[in-house]
Image: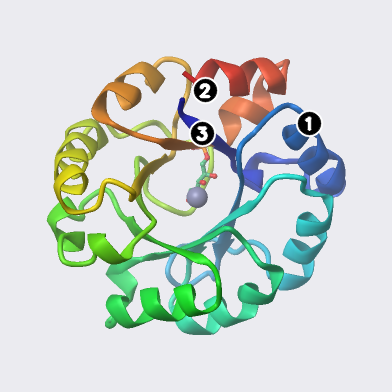
Amino acid sequence: MIQVAPSILSADFGNLGRDVEAICSAGCDLVHVDVMDGHFVPNLTIGPVVVSSVAKCATKPLDIHLMVENNTFFVDLFAPLKPKYISFHIEEEKHPHRLIQHIRSLGIKPAIVLNPHTRPESVEYLLEELDMVLLMSVNPGFGGQSFIESVIPKATRLNEMRNILNPNCLIEVDGGVNDKNIHRLKEAGVDVVVAGSYVFKHASKKEAIESLQI
Ligand code: DX5
Ligand code: ZN
């Protein structure tokens, strides 16, 4: 079954604790936290002070998605919060292999994110070291954008690669995911989806999450 990680970027930040508790009791699998620095992406979100409050309210593990320039600095900043995953963008990292090892040494599962233009082959020689690859299906920076269709053949290709090189490495897709594209994502071999606006704008968070857990 596909795991669902609602993105708290679409939550009501004035009632963040309430919204985090709501998605957890609605049956989500992970809590997706988008960390943006205003440099790698043209938006700025939250730091460790806010995320530590999120961690206290969450009864599901955190999935931290870094969209930042200085990955190692941010990994070390968020590691004490003990997230399940930390993912970083390969486009912004000179030494991804070293950073994967560093994240693992902190007791956290390492993941790499690929922007819409980045080829799945860019992680070929890293796959054996990774717990997850996150494919962006929108340009990073904002919630509520439309789904970029080319992620489907890309996930299909990555699925072939990981089945050979590391079947334990999960494939996650982030951006514009809803009940219209979830079946095609499942067919392409996707294991985890991030969903922000679809879950938070739905009349029932539980129904929204369950409609993606196929
Ligand atoms: C975009 C973020 C996503 C975003 C998804 O940079 O990485 O996690 O919040 O939101 P939706 O599901 O609304 O596209
Ligand atoms: Zn994200």
Label 1 is placed on what type of residue? Answer: Ser
Q: Are marks 1 and 3 in contact (CB under 8 Å)?
A: no
Q: Which residue is mark 1?
A: 25
Foreground pick, 162 / 47: 162
Q: Position of residue 128 (x, y in %)?
A: 25, 62
Label of residue 213 in the image: 2
Would you place residue 76 above or below residue 107 in this image? Answer: below
In this picture the colour scheme is rainbow
> Residue shown at 52%/22% (left/top)?
213
Q: Is residue 175 left or right of residue 28?
A: left
Q: Position of residue 41 (x, y in %)?
A: 45, 63
What kind of element bears circle 2?
loop
What kind of element bears circle 1?
helix
Within 10 angstroms of label 1, few (less than 14), some, or many (20 or more) residues? some
- Does any portion of residue 122 appear in the rendered image? yes
Q: CA distance from mark 1 to mark 3?
A: 15 Å
